[in-house]
Amino acid sequence: MYTVTKLEDYSPAALDMAVRELLSALDSESKGVNNKSDWKNFRDRWMARKNGILTQINDLWLKAAPAAAKREVGQRVNELKTCVTDIVETRRAIVESGLSKDAIARVTGVEARIEVGQIVAETRGRRLELDQLDITLPSIRRPIGAEHPVIKALNEIVSVFKAMGYSVSEGPEIETDYYNFEALNFPPNHPARDTQDTLFIAGQQSKPLRDRLLLRTHTSPVQIRTMEKLAPPIRVVIPGKVHRNDAPDASHSPMFHQVEGLAVDTNITFCDLKGTLDHAMKALFGSSVRTRFQPSFFPFTEPSAEVAISCIFCGGKGCRTCKQSGWIELLGCGMVDPNVFEFVRANGYDPAKVSGFAFGMGADRIALLKYGVDDIQLFFQGDVRFLEQFA
């Protein structure tokens, strides 16, 4: 009968020998367990809290070990606890399965735990609690996520302009009035500065107007920030999330995504702008798409234009989507107003020497067109059944 003795030698070799002796005794005693009564005695002998063998090795080996050896002893004691627990539970599963003595004899020992699981599984209708690893079963696969349709459309737009030599620039979503309005040539009484259109951060009334914080209404502030950092020539595309005080409906959301672009160099003309956007629209919607430019107004561009593409659903013949017009308005653009360059003149943007164009489009609107969705709210409701269609 195995008895735990106090260790005199705590060298790794001596510890390994003591562990082998204990495991040999565990294996030998487990073979004699043939019924529930035997198993209870076996469990109590090895796992009883007061005087079980596991408790004894914890007291006589680990607690009595010198400080320098406690780590080595602790590792082995923990391994022995796991091994003893496994063997005791394995014997219980075998006993409760109702296997014959011959069958029990074939599945004894630490090395046979996998075979135990196979034999016990054959006894249907009995309560089994054997915790085992069956390497023949397929692993649990976590579903791999996919890009959100809006982000997918946004990345596709960015890739089109990156292919034309544009770099990507980003900026903060919480902006100051200066970058969001003042430096973009918005006059102080412009309607966009009103709380009915813009979401301002609370508690800003005591600050000067230009320092008040707000949720940016467009990604245009990044244009100013980029020109402050980089001297011309520059060509950047700016993706990001923006916020406006809009009531949510099928075509509006208080939060949406934009992609803006800015190109500044010497002798940039409106023809460069038209050629750039025409190429981009064909890359996004197909080579048969035509573009149309109509005069418009934006505070930061002069002249300005609204860009429409021929309806991708009816080919320009007229349908419900394009309201029988054959055209779908998609984005705004224009030549950078010289007043905007005045805010960054010190960094080389002399309006008498450089010119540039800017454009901006909603990634959400383009996603609606590309994927045939008729309600923008569907993109933000988090319904996986809807979103997984675009994976």
Image (cartoon, rainbow, N blue to C red):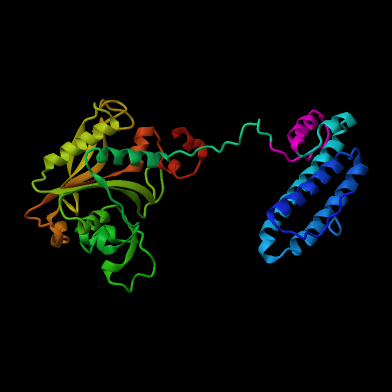
Q: Residue drawn 25% across and 63% down?
A: 178
Residue 75 in the image: above or below residue 322:
below
Q: Is residue 254 left or right of residue 102?
A: left
Return the x and y of residue 296 as percentages of the image width and height: 18, 46
Q: Is residue 119 magenta?
A: yes
Q: Is residue 136 magenta?
A: no
Residue 313 in the image: above or below residue 130:
above
Return the x and y of residue 195 as percentages of the image width and height: 34, 61
Q: Residue drawn 50% across and 38% down?
A: 144
Q: Nearer the viewer, residue 83 or 345?
A: 83
Return the x and y of residue 389 as percentages of the image width and height: 47, 33
Q: How many marks?
A: 0
Q: Residue drawn 80% across and 48% down?
A: 21
* Residue occupying the far left of the picture: 352
Splitting the image into 4 quarters, where does residue 194 fall?
Answer: bottom left
Q: Is residue 192 left or right of residue 137?
A: left
Q: Which residues are magenta?
A: 111-133
Q: Is residue 52 left or right of residue 136?
A: right
Q: Nearer the viewer, residue 300 or 122?
A: 122
Q: Nearer the viewer, residue 93 or 27?
A: 27
Return the x and y of residue 12 as percentages of the image width and height: 68, 54
Splitting the image into 4 quarters, where does residue 37 fall?
Answer: top right
Residue 83 in the image: above or below residue 190:
above
